[in-house]
Image (cartoon, grey):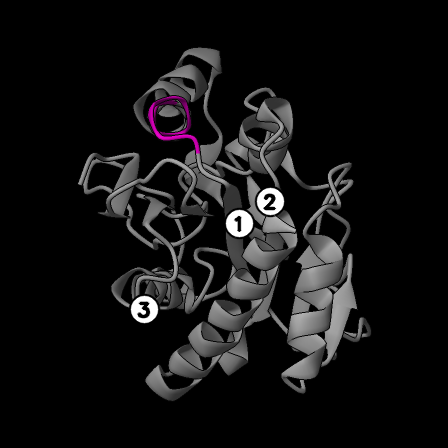
Amino acid sequence: MIEGWRQLGRPRADGILLIADHASAHVPDDIDLGIDPALLANHIAIDIGVAEVAALLVEDGVVDAAILGGVSRLVVDCNREPDAPGAVPIASDGHAIPGNALDHAGREARLARFFHPYHARIAAVVASARPAMILSLHSFTPSLASDPEQQRPWEVGVLYNEDTRLVPAAIAALTAAGLTVGDQLPYSGKLLNATMNRHAEANDIPYVGIEMRQDLVADAAGQRRFAAHLAKMCKDAALKLAA
């Protein structure tokens, strides 16, 4: 594993590439975030269940390759523009991250070490083995500590920005599986879509962003169940592209 990313499988031209920005809770030994270590198991640090579901999709041959973020989103959030304050967050869901109060040089060094290699790897894979579609995989918390009144009842969300080619097939497949589907929920891909804007939309590659509710993919049974749902969704999306 390179510090900024980890790859599963082998990319294939005209295949399916999975990208998971927040698949790791790893914090390198030389970085002190100044937080309770227990928070590294929390949604603020990692998209729970994503790495496991991604591995199942690769093992089952549903996707050809997966590129996973190599460090916690508290170290660097790769689903942000590099100049966005949240790329190196100083707070998340009510928790301060004092170790991220960096000067300009420190912040740039953090991005150079993790953020830029991650995106460079994705760009290299897309250039050398252009996929037919990209699956962006995340998970979301059913409740926010900073906003306990907000209700997040959806079991899965489908996110996108301008490119909607795969959206109808994705929503239809997940709805047919009996899931409660949020269209642009629990937040909108038009507001938070940096990685897909950069690597999918900018290259005219069809994609869909999937947000799994983390409590449904917190154990092996839930991960296998969601992998099956996403396998069917990817099959239907591929048929849509071929039509």
Q: Identify the residue at image location x=42%, y=16%.
A: 108
Where disc 1 sits, the SS reads strand
Q: In this view, does 175 lie to the left or right of 29?
A: right
Instruction: Tell me the kind of residue under disc 1.
Output: Ser
- Find out whether residue 129 is within the magenta segment: yes
| Label 2 with label 1: CB-CB less than 8 Å | yes
Q: Which of marks 3 and 1 is nearer the N terminus?
A: 3
In the rendered image, the vertical position of residue 72 relative to residue 225, given as above or below: above
Residue hosting label 3: 56
Q: Which of marks 2 and 1 is nearer the N terminus?
A: 1
> What crowding class fits label 2: few (fewer than 14 Cα within 10 Å), some (14-19), or many (20 or more)?
many
Residue hosting label 1: 136
Q: Give the residues in magenta.
A: 124-130
Q: Distance between the residues labelled 3 and 1?
A: 15 Å
Q: Identify the residue at image location x=23%, y=35%.
A: 3
- Find out whether residue 120 is within the magenta segment: no
